[in-house]
Image (cartoon, grey):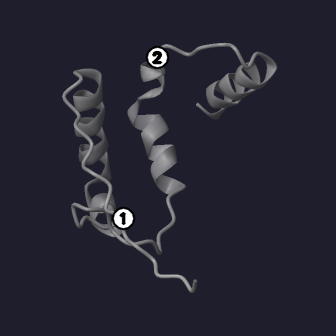
Amino acid sequence: MVTKLESLTLRAREDPKCKFTSLAHLLSEDFLKECFWELKRDKASGIDGVTVQEYEVKLGENLKDLVERLKAKRYKPQPVRRVYISKPD
């Protein structure tokens, strides 16, 4: 799967005007599993409160369900949790 991503990256760099209309063909359980293993383990959970460790317990089932919802266009991403970080000045 990495080779597909690399080829897409190369194509986008070579032809900046190239438009990708759909990348849904990349959404497979294997691809998403590779993405999962690249997640940073020490980050906070998302708005749903599920940690990486909790998701990993049933990783196969979770990814299968996610792929089914993505391909059926039933997946609705949850809103992003906004956190304000105070800064001097």
* Viewer-nearest residue: 21 or 69: 21
Count the labels in the image. Answer: 2
Residue at 27% in and 51% down: 79
Q: Which residue is mark 2?
A: 22
Callout 2: SS: loop
**Sequence order check: which comes first, mark 2 or mark 1?**
2
Above or below 26: residue 80:
below
Q: Amino acid at mark 1?
A: Val
Q: Considering only vertical position in the picture, is 87 above or below 57?
A: below
Q: Please state which of residues 22 and 33 is positioned toward the viewer in this rendering.
A: 22
Residue extending farthest to the left is 74
Location of residue 29 (image quadrant) = top left
Residue shown at the point (45%, 71%) measured from the top left: 43
The residue sitting at 25% across, 55% down in the picture is 58
The residue wearing badge 1 is: 52
Q: Position of residue 5 (x, y in %)?
A: 63, 30
Residues at marks 2 and 1, CA–CA distance in whole angstroms: 28 Å
Which class describes the residues within 10 Å of circle 1: few (<14), some (14-19), or many (20+)?
some
Q: How many residues crowd around disc 2 within 10 Å: few (fewer than 14), some, or many (20 or more)?
A: few
Q: Amino acid at mark 2?
A: Ser
The part of the image, by quadrant, that contains residue 14 is top right
Residue at 48 percent across and 25 percent down: it is 26
Residue situated in front as seen by the camera: 13 or 8 = 13
